[in-house]
Amino acid sequence: MVLAILVVERVLFGQSLSTAVVWLGLTRTTTRGFAAGIAIGLLLLLVTPVYAVHASMALKWYPRGTGLLVGLLAQGGVAEEVLFRGYLFGHACEKYRFYCSS
């Protein structure tokens, strides 16, 4: 998804790769935000096993669960934010000139 958005920025809007990366908010300043999001997500993932232990339930890991978990985090976290906050909201701010905090 992120690669597709970068290609769209290059092809449709004529931006260089470095300009598109900055436009989408994928700069060094977002590293702390990514780290905080990952930390909070991991804490939320711990809720299920803690609850299962507390409720005396048996946990069973899905055979391909690791791959699904990585895909879920990449799509639901990174790709969604880049698409909606970086691409759509960024272009809406530029075109319609309403208040934007970025």
Image (cartoon, helix red, strand yellow):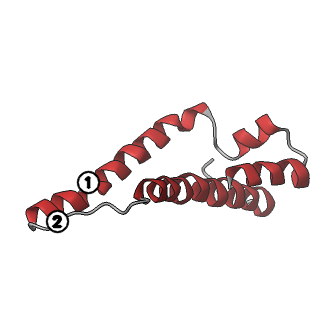
Image point 80% across, 38% down: which residue?
Answer: 17
Q: Is residue 8 left or right of residue 61?
A: right
Residue 45 at what x, y percent from top left?
31, 56
* Within-10-Å neighbours for mark 2: few <14, some 14–19, many 20+: few
Vertical position of residue 56 compared to residue 18: above or below: below
Mark nearer the N terminus (2 vs 1): 1
Q: Which mark is residue 60?
A: none
Quarter of the image for residue 94 reads bottom right
Q: Is residue 101 left or right of residue 67?
A: right
Image point 52% across, 60% down: which residue?
Answer: 76
Picture mark count: 2
Q: State how far apart marks 2 and 1 are (Cα).
A: 15 Å
Towards the viewer: 91 or 5: 5
Quarter of the image for residue 62 reads bottom left
Q: Which mark is residue 58?
A: 2
Vertical position of residue 34 compared to residue 66: above or below: above
Residue 29 at what x, y percent from top left?
56, 33
Image point 47% across, 36% down: which residue?
Answer: 32
Q: Nearer the viewer, mark 2 or mark 1?
A: 2
* Within-10-Å neighbours for mark 1: few <14, some 14–19, many 20+: few
Q: Which residue is mark 1?
A: 46
Q: Identify residue type, mark 1.
A: Leu
Q: Secondary structure at mark 2?
A: loop
Towards the viewer: 100 or 14: 14
Q: Identify residue type, mark 2.
A: Ala
- Farthest front residue in view: 63
Towards the viewer: 74 or 82: 74
Residue 83 at what x, y percent from top left?
66, 58
Residue 58 at what x, y percent from top left?
17, 65
Q: Secondary structure at mark 1?
A: loop
Which quadrant would the N terminus be assigned to in this image?
Answer: bottom right
